[in-house]
Amino acid sequence: TALALEPSSWRRVGLFLELPRVRGAGVNKVMVSVINQLYLIACVVCRMGVNWQRIRSILNPRMLKPKHVSSYTNTINDVVSDFIHRVSLLRETNGGGVMVHDLTAELYKFAFEGICSVLFETRMGCMNQVVPEETQKFIFSVGEMFQLSPIIVLFPKSVWPYLPFWKQFVAAWDHLFKVGEQPIRQKMESIQQKVHLDQSVEGAYLTHLLLSDQMTVTEILGSITELLLAGVDTTSNTVSWCLYELAKQPEVQEQLYQEVMSVCPGDELPNSEDIARMPYLKAIVRETLRLYPVVPGNARVSVDNEIVVGDHLFPKDTLFHLCHYAVSYDEHIYPDAHSFLPQRWLRGAPEKSRQHPFGSLPFGFGIRACLGRRVAELEMYLLLSRLMKHYEVRPDPAGTAVKPITRTLLCPAKPIDLQFVDRPAKQRRAV
Ligand code: HEM
């Protein structure tokens, strides 16, 4: 095993395709019930080599091509509108008119609703006053799966079934697949009905996958479940940290507010073209992901050949662990590394030209990099810009500092509570 703490090593290692076996189907297969094994081995994350490549090349275009991704803007904006109302409801019902407690839990619901509306082309009701039980259980199961995974892999595979939390772990996986399955079956039925009635069939992600005939239904079920799994905690934790930092830094928040209002004045809803004209917003998200990389480290295996990285020769099959979190806080790479300084990401900033291009890679690198990056960015930008238009975010006056903790992903160690103060409507219109 090699720990990669020098960003240049990414350039070489990130190009490998293979992830460590521990994430591979060989191990995961024993994790879940017999039926769900089928879906799991069809997932993109668990797959290796040519199988992975084939599935990834089918999933890629509608997840990563700007033309397709920007077509999800209205769908996501509808979810954002509901989240804004939910903030207001939470403040009134449980926050003394101003406070939202445990923001991350609320953002999980937003992220789940957002990714479901993109993938399934339907709404799940997570922004309703009462969140559907199944959804709540899915969110809980994702959390449980991420929390237990790093513990389970410390034990040899043969003892897993005897671990006290094994059943819980299996139940969590089973539930994840169950939640994905239902809307997919519904969509298949509705497509079949339309075809039967000779009606035209239109739709976005799922409809496209189901109609394109490039993947089996099992592969679609596996891949969609995995996108759900990867798409909830990642964006929600990142937005939580971003709002936490903005609350602590009113001058940064004010600059962002001014940028949003100058590009998108009054009550207009930002769209993807507007977002392209908000460099400070993007810099804020980049800086958030530097200080709180939600995937704090990941890995690659050099399966084909030995490899030279820096001055070292590593044998074939070396496991490289890429330490995003450690590199993000390296003072040689990011001076004043512990401070939240979004301006370091602005084009033309003196810091930017001195920064290592591989210093912060929160979405990974190479052909195996994050599949949901563009959708995640669009979701975060649309949500943050709208929140800024409606609310000024302030810290909890009684609150203390919140530190990150790793549960596979980097999460807040305790709930983040923030005040959401209305921006005067006339102020919004005047700018
Ligand atoms: C702030 C948001 C997110 C961050 C920081 C993030 C980060 C990452 C990272 C670091 C990886 C591993 C890449 C590598 O090994 O090089 C990854 C993989 C992946 N992500 Fe994300 N992610 C985010 C959101 C999402 C969303 C919203 C989705 C789904 C729509 C998603 C789907 C995936 C999938 C499917 C993979 C596995 C790709 C493969 O193995 O081929 N991610 N993500």
Image (cartoon, rainbow, N blue to C red):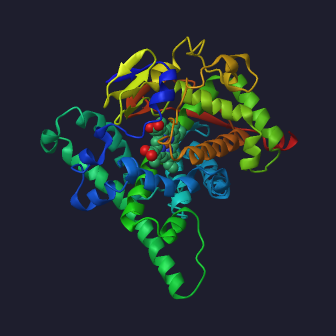
Residue 403 visible, this angle: no
Task: Return the x and y of residue 322 as percentages of the image width and height.
Answer: 42, 27
Task: Report the residue that reaches farthest toward the right.
Answer: 430
Q: Is residue 254 left or right of residue 319?
A: right
Q: Nearer the viewer, residue 312 or 164?
A: 312
- Identified at 51% across, 71% down, the residue is 211
Q: Nearer the viewer, residue 397 or 220?
A: 220
Task: Return the x and y of residue 251 as percentages of the image width and height.
Answer: 72, 23
- Identified at 76% across, 28% down, the residue is 255
Viewport quadrant of the C terminus: top right
Task: Return the x and y of residue 34 as percentages of the image width and height.
Answer: 22, 59
Q: Quadrant of residue 159?
A: top left
Task: Report the residue that reaches farthest toward the front.
Answer: 305
Q: Answer above or below: position of 79 versus 365.
A: below
Q: Nearer the viewer, residue 252 or 354?
A: 354
Q: Quadrant of residue 261?
A: top right
Q: Nearer the viewer, residue 424 or 368?
A: 368
Q: Answer above or below: position of 87 versus 225.
A: above
Q: Is residue 28 left or right of residue 109?
A: left
- Identified at 30% across, 50% down, the residue is 172
